[in-house]
Amino acid sequence: MSTSGTRRPGDPGADAPEAIGEAAGSERWRAVARRIDAPRKVIDRILAVLCVAIFTALVLIVGWQVFSRQVLPTPASWTEETARYVFVVLAMFGSTLVFSERGHIAVELLASRFRPTVQRAMAVAVELTVVFFALFVLVYGGLRATRNAWGQNISTMPVSVGQIYLVLPVAGVLITYFAICHLVGVLAGEKQAVPEIDEANQGI
């Protein structure tokens, strides 16, 4: 009986279809990761410009506060409260941008000692935890805080406290999107499970 049409496991080329299937599946995952990650660069640029503008406004407000107190006979009463709220908005958008670039504080000494499969599992767990925190605390909690404080006016600013609190759900949605980008990138092999340390950005 001829057996030329059958292949047994271990024969040369027997595992080729499985390997081709795995490669095709991995390539599909990479394509999905690139497609999801594509808008992130545009969002990062917008966040960077926004952070620079807000930081510039904060410097001008604080500078005017010092000038009015030290030079003018009557200090500007609106600067202190305005600077406080502007700083909060800057902190939220700045932390969102840092998370997008995977530049947040992380203890990598323990994770780097595990095998790549364990590192990937830890990275997935971390990103899922971030998604839960962003959705539950920032988006859900932020919307409730915004609704409760929407009519609370600020005497020194033309906006209400609730309108400023809108930065919480906005940051939560962006962080959720960035975490999903990181998660899909790690699963597809497009991103490392343990982010590389940029020595140029390390503080002294």
Image (spheres, rainbow, N blue to C red):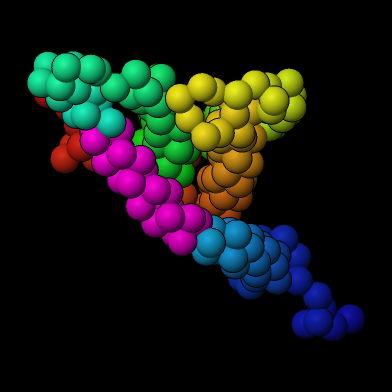
> Quick check: can you spot residue 86?
yes
- Horizontal side, residue 112 vs residue 151: left or right: left
Relative to 21, residue 64 above or below:
above
Q: Position of residue 153 (x, y in %)?
A: 60, 24
- Horizontal side, residue 179 vs residue 65: left or right: right
Relative to 4, residue 175 above or below:
above
Q: In this view of the protein, which residue sits in the foreground, 132 or 79?
A: 79
Q: Residue at x 41, y 30 (%)?
A: 86
Q: In this view of the protein, which residue sits in the foreground, 82 or 104?
A: 82
* Residue 48 part of the magenta segment: yes
* Residue 75 part of the magenta segment: no
Single out the residue that lies furthest toward the front.
73
Q: Position of residue 175 (x, y in %)?
A: 56, 39
Q: Residue at x 89, y 81 (%)?
A: 1
* Picture quadrant where residue 55 is located: top left
The residue stretch that appears in magenta: 40-60
Q: In this view of the protein, which residue sits in the foreground, 155 or 29?
A: 155
Relative to 17, residue 39 above or below:
above
- Horizontal side, residue 80 vs residue 191: left or right: left
